[in-house]
Image (cartoon, rainbow, N blue to C red):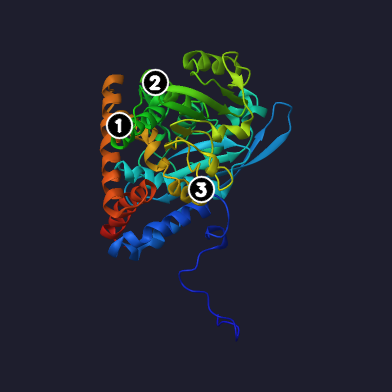
Amino acid sequence: MANTPGTPAAPAHSLPSYMQADHLGPWGIYLQQVDRVTPYLGHLARWVETLKRPKRILVVDVPIELDNGTIAHYEGYRVQHNLSRGPGKGGVRFHQDVTLSEVMALSAWMSIKNAAVNVPYGGAKGGIRVDPKTLSRGELERLTRRYTSEIGLLIGPSKDIPAPDVNTNGQIMAWMMDTYSMNTGATATGVVTGKPVDLGGSLGRVEATGRGVFTVGVEAAKLTGLALEGARVAVQGFGNVGGIAAKLFAEAGAKVVAVQDHTGTVFKGSGLDVPALLAHVKQNGGVGGFAGADAMNPGDFWGVDCEILIPAALEGQITKDNASQIKAKLVIEGANGPTTPEADDILHDKGVLVLPDVIANAGGVTVSYFEWVQDFSSFFWSEDEINARLVRIMQEAFAGVWQVSQEHKVSLRTATFIVACQRILHAREMRGLYP
């Protein structure tokens, strides 16, 4: 159809409104990050629009019967951002605030993360808008199985492999694996990772993301001359990521002085008893009320005197409003997207070294890769072997990113994007366009 006279034609490269950078939200942040790295891509910049358009977006209705006999409907998502380097890989989160923008961004960051550590995956992510705490175990199982059936046309051991994320765990993965297997008529352990060990899960998987955070932190400390012995650490989020990272830093001689989660903020200048705090969290569901520390105003957390800050909760936590308060020398992003671009600039100007999520928290997907490989071969490794392989991959990946950051005099985030985007777009270029 011809354009109406006087109406300019839309440019061929224009993006749908929900994919534009000025459409605020996590996806907008990701697009700003891509724009920052584009000048460093050389001839591959020709393909950069590939990174700004998810390959597939699936939005599904997830109806279930509640225990009281009523029917409830929930909105579910599965986004495959890029599959040029291999099958999609990324978690599934159950959270009442999940949005399409968030899932799109998380899938894109998975593309970057997988390429940065050079595992043969593309990026994907999923989620359901639900507060799982409001559901019984039976309702949660029905929700998981229905969602798995709805996204079943996209997932598979060689197509797209979900994993645990916020409010999902090994049990959720077991239900997903069983549902997919029943629908396809054969047990397919490799359709998800993060499963219980008895169902083909990997040793070391639960601790992997936190161990990766610790590993890159150690490497950065070496390169910047920061002594870990006696270094003060503040951690936001105290689950599998923040809790494990805190434990490993404490064992290395650092002092964890402040911890914040959704239940409260606790502080002890001489160092928290991390094992006791982990036990308290396991029993009470959060750090709030921990007797071995003082309660702190949540807003004061960001200004705590410390050398290392680990945001390991949700995205968008460090913003232009609180970045100037941060006193840490090193910020290690355990969460996905915890720092906004404006905050990134503030921290850079303050001389704070930020270890970005796309490298710092890649330990989880690295051991997910190990789990996937073990499932295909039906041959399983010891936990020591897994941890050693994880540390080696994380060290090599970080060294490569550090070298690029020094070469181009850019932040570690931009350096990580340079490494990852070049790998993704080179794969895209080599594969070409079909048909």
Above-or-below relation of 85 to 293: below
Nearer the N terminus, badge 2 or badge 3?
A: 2
Question: Horizontally, is 378 left or right of 280 in the view?
Answer: left
Q: Name the residue carrying label 2.
A: 197
* Cα–Cα span, label 2 and label 3: 40 Å
Disc number lying in front (2 or 1): 2
Q: Secondary structure at mark 2?
A: helix
User: Callout 2 environment at 10 Å: few (<14), some (14 to 19), or many (20+)?
Assistant: few
Tell me if I can see residue 382 in this picture.
no
Towards the viewer: 288 or 118: 288
Nearer the N terminus, badge 1 or badge 3?
A: 3
User: Callout 1 environment at 10 Å: few (<14), some (14 to 19), or many (20+)?
Assistant: few
Discs 2, 1 touching: Cβ within 8 Å: no
Q: Residue at x 26, y 52 (%)?
A: 407
Q: Name the residue carrying label 1.
A: 376
* Cα–Cα span, label 1 and label 3: 42 Å
